[in-house]
Image (cartoon, rainbow, N blue to C red):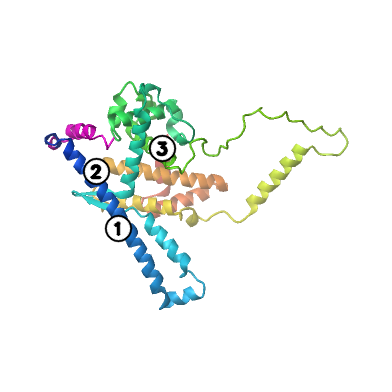
Amino acid sequence: RFHNHAKVLKDVSEENSFFANLNEDHIRQLSDLLAEGLEKTMEVHLSQTSQKAVAAEDGGGGGPAGAKKEDGGDGGDGGVEKKEKKEKEKDPTLGFYGNAIRVKETKNRLVELRAVDEMVGKMDDLGKFRIGGAMLPRAPVWARKCQWTPKDDAMILVGIYKHGFGSWDKMLGDEALGMGKIQASVEPGTKNTPEAHLHVRANALLRRLREVKQGTRSMASGPGRQLGPPRGSGPPRRKAPRPPPGSGKVPRARKAGAAASAQAKQKMKKGPPPTVKEILGTEEIRATLKKIKVLQDGTKPVTKEFKMKKMKLYLSRVGHHIESVARENGFGEKEEEEVWQLAAKKSRLTDGTRMKTIFKRLQG
């Protein structure tokens, strides 16, 4: 609850004795400075992005790029708009008293925490708080191991309201939240921890909460659901009579099933399966492999715990993508092994087989 200055002062004073010398006015001034800095940095970023796009458009007529533009090539308005969109999507950084603050990420987090405060804070009995529908993301892989329920997801938001985002140890120790069951999802000898599970799940819940609050996701229906009249509210449906035996006529349901099967087979025949490079060529997977490579190089000084936490996250992302593509295209072990080998090569890991084994171990 960043806007609750008394709560912020109390929390940070417990973490750092320096803040014990401050008061609520100091915290309010710091929060105002941060909010102002976020807005100004975003304005400058958007302004610079527009200027670069205009400069690229104006300067495209003189050289080869200009000629390509006249011929109807990639140097036209479409390329400029695409480049401008890509620049706008970047997350600018604000320098705030020696800390690098991601502007979009921080603004999103503040929206999420304020939404939690508005939803949970109005409850007289926090134990009765529940969420559902479009606000529930897909259940995590480890949910079955500990009988995780939507009530537990709601208690994560209650824990964030009571203890603050990131205070996973306090949430685990809060008996009112009932987070002890998550211990059953952790197997000895693996890098998965209850804190890591809570962190990932909390991020997913907060992101979904923000999408609903900002109107980018409907509150009424979950993904793939369409609202309509209740079942049985309309007039009764009359069943079509079955053709008599020996008439040679095929029932309508069987015809529809055969047609759907033929369409599915025709769809499978369209185009060859993706190549190994195409599978790992998506923007998200390329960026993830690059992050693994940076962790392996050791160019950035990070703690061992941070490195293991990030490595687990990145490997899970790559592994789920490879398994999904292999399943959709009916890959055998040989084709899937080729994908893992290329992924290991691009991320500077020793061997694709070992990379796959680590991923399987992380999934339990």
Residue wearing tag 3: 209
Q: Left or right: where does residue 18 sit relative to residue 109?
A: left
Q: Which mark is residue 44?
A: 1
Rendering coords of residue 29 (x, y %) = 19, 42
Q: Residue at x 42, y 36 (%)?
A: 363
**Nearer-N-terminus badge (1/2):** 1
Q: Is residue 261 magenta?
A: no
Query: In the depicted view, which residue is nearer to us: 345 or 262?
Result: 262
Q: Is residue 7 magenta?
A: yes
Kindly indicate the quadrant of the structure image that contains residue 174: top left
Label 1 secondary element: helix
For marks 1 and 2, give the CA distance. Answer: 33 Å
**Nearer-N-terminus badge (3/2):** 3
Rendering coords of residue 224 (x, y %) = 55, 39
Q: Residue at x 73, y 42 (%)?
A: 258
Label 3 secondary element: helix
Residues shaded magenta: 1-18
Q: Which mark is residue 303?
A: 2
- Give, as a three-letter code, the residue at label 2: Thr
